[in-house]
Structure formats: structure tokens, C-alpha cells
Amino acid sequence: MNTKAFIKPFILGCLTVGCAAAYAEPMRATLPDGRQVILFDDNTWQYDTPSVSPGATRAPVRQGQNSPASLPIPPKPGAGAAAVAVGTSASASGHAGQASASQQAMATIPGDMIIPGNGKVVGVHERSGIELTLQAASYQNGELVIPTRLKNDATDAVVLVELELRLRSRSGDVIAREKHKVWTSVKRMPETYFRPGTERTGREIRLKVPQAEQYFLETEFLTVEQW
């Protein structure tokens, strides 16, 4: 329906009814598009907005002047705040995207992530029935220190467990590469053997590297010698 063509006879009819009823307070009417108007007893009208009350000062809008399509529509409350919120959200999304990209890049670095001092197990590795647990790491006197724990689930005693270690920075560069024996026994001295069904504390891994918040450690079994 054409609002311009409808509003003049609509408001005139409402004003006639309003005058005949002699209401003390202005009347309100709803337009076909859902908006409401206030009808005053001096043959003026205006849109009903939250800032308008029957007793408030008003600028008269004579019937036939300023159709509803040409009158300014008041801004919705909170529109400015919403714009700020959208801008803030976009900025936050940008930072989140950068953080996500950084995390994805680190996720491609091989090895167990090490955060010295966080108290978490670095990783667990297994070969030939020997389970190696790299325990929580720390940084001490210029060295990255990783305690080890071994469990023998094999059927034979073990006299040697040797590893090859590659330590990487958070950018993926190799900063240390070493061979490390986490368990050795003396052959023909059974009391030194790593017996089946037992757990033992292995030798600490100590790597002299610059201090950093994060490292990535690749662990490879070179030798598991059984006796």
C-alpha cells in the first residue's frame, strides 16, 4: 500500500473521531507499515518515538506536510555502540587469525613440544617392549633438563637403551643434535640388568641450548640391546 496516499485521509479520519470523542489526551494510531503516530487536538500529528511524550514540546507537522516517507527516521538506540563492537570484533578476529596462523606453523614442527617449568610430561615413546617417558622439563644453569623413566614390558632383560635427539626452536631450526644413553648395564653382572616387568629411572637428558619459552624434541631409539 502507498503510505503517502494513505496517511492524509487516514489521519483526517482519526482526527475527526478524536475530536468527536473529546479526549483530554492525544490519540495514537498505527500506520499500515507498523509505525505509530500521535494525533493532537490542534490538528497536528507526529511519529510516536521513545523520545516523544504527550506533554512534551513538539514541532507541529501540519496535515499534508512532510509525508512519512520524507520524515527523518530516528537512529536505533545503541547503533553507535554496535558499530564500535563490530570494529572491535573485526580487530580481535585479525589478532586471532594471526595467533591461529602461528599455532598452525608450530603444529608442523616435528617432535614433542617442551615448555620448561610447566610440570607436564613431554612425551612417551616405545620400542621393542621398552617404554620411555620424557618427564617434565626445566631449564637449569644453561641446560635444558629432561628426567626419564623406563618400563620394560619385553620378555628379556635390557642392558642398553640409546637415543638420538634433535631439539628444535619454535621456528623449526635444529639447535641441538645428540646421542644419549638413558640406560646402560654391565654385561655379565645380572644385578645391573633392566629386568622384564620392572620400571627404572633412566639418565637425565641435558642439552646445552639458549633459554627459550618453547622447544620441540624429536626422539628416536637407536639401540635397545637385550641380554
Image (cartoon, rainbow, N blue to C red):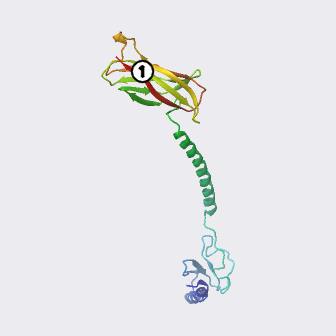
Question: Depth check: 200 or 184 in front?
Answer: 184
**Residue occupied by mark 1:** 161
Taking 119 as reference, is 23 left or right? right
Relative to 207, say whether 82 is above or below.
below
Residue 116, can we see it?
no
Report which quarter residue 153 is drawn in.
top left
x and y, in percent, of residue 92 in the image: 60, 50
Q: Residue at x 61, y 77 (%)?
A: 47
Could you say where residue 221 lies in the image, as x and y percent from the top left? 44, 26
Look at the image and tell me in which quarter the C terminus lies. top left
Residue extending farthest right: 59
> Is the residue 98 above or below the residue 70 in the image?
above
Within 10 angstroms of label 1, few (less than 14), some, or many (20 or more) residues?
Answer: many
Q: Is residue 117 above or below residue 194?
A: below
Locate the N terminus and report the quarter of the image it occupies. bottom right
Residue in the picture at 30% in, 22% down = 155
Is 216 rendered above or below residue 23?
above
Q: Quadrant of residue 130?
A: top left
Residue at screen point 66% across, 78% down = 71
Of all residues, the one furthest to the left in this rendering is 155
Amino acid type, label 1? Val
